[in-house]
């Protein structure tokens, strides 16, 4: 789910959200679409998949959804893979 042979967009989104700066405070689907040169519906799909797996959490501000990393969940998933899940 996180990585397919031809597309690592979800991993790049997670990495971007870890960087210091505006992305660290959460991003909208529009910001993701612009940053990665994606159509907005594609960005929304990636974000929703990451949210569904618990890697991202959301908040609302001014009627817009903002996506944030859930570093605790990401660490849990990483541990599962390290144990040979």
Image (cartoon, rainbow, N blue to C red):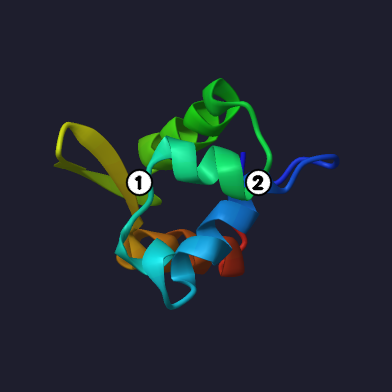
Residue 36, label in figure: 2
Q: CA distance from mark 1 to mark 2?
A: 21 Å
Image side of residue 19 versus residue 27, left or right: right
Q: Is 43 located above or below residue 32 in the figure? A: above
Image side of residue 81 versus residue 20, left or right: right
Residue at image position (44%, 37%) is: 29
Quarter holding the C terminus is bottom right
Residue 7 place in picture, x, y as percent: 77, 41
Residue at image position (63%, 56%) is: 12
Residue at image position (68%, 40%) is: 37
Check disc 2: other Cα within 10 Å, few if <14, some if 14-19, many if 20+: few
Residue 54 place in picture, x, y as percent: 35, 46
Residue 68, label in figure: none
Quarter holding the N terminus is top right
Image side of residue 66 versus residue 55, left or right: left
The outermost residue toward the bottom is: 20
Residue at image position (34%, 47%) is: 67
- Nearest-to-viewer mark from 1 and 2: 2
Q: Quadrant of residue 82?
A: bottom right
The residue nearer to you, when weighing 10 against 44, is 44
Residue 83 place in picture, x, y as percent: 56, 67
Q: Is 80 located above or below residue 27 in the figure? A: below
Image side of residue 33 versus residue 48, left or right: right
Can I make out residue 36 in this image? yes
The outermost residue toward the right is: 6
Residue 54, label in figure: 1
Q: Secondary structure at mark 1?
A: loop
Q: Secondary structure at mark 2?
A: loop
Earlier-in-chain disc, 1 versus 2: 2
Q: Is 79 located above or below residue 68 in the figure? A: below
């Amino acid at each position: 789910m996180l990585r397919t042979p031809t597309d690592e967009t979800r991993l790049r989104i997670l990495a971007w959200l870890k960087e210091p700066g505006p992305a660290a405070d959460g991003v909208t689907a529009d910001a993701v679409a612009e940053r990665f040169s994606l159509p907005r519906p594609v960005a929304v799909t990636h974000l929703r998949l990451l949210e569904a797996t618990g890697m991202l959490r959301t908040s609302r501000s001014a009627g817009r959804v903002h996506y944030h990393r859930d570093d605790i969940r990401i660490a849990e998933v990483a541990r599962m893979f390290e144990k040979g899940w």
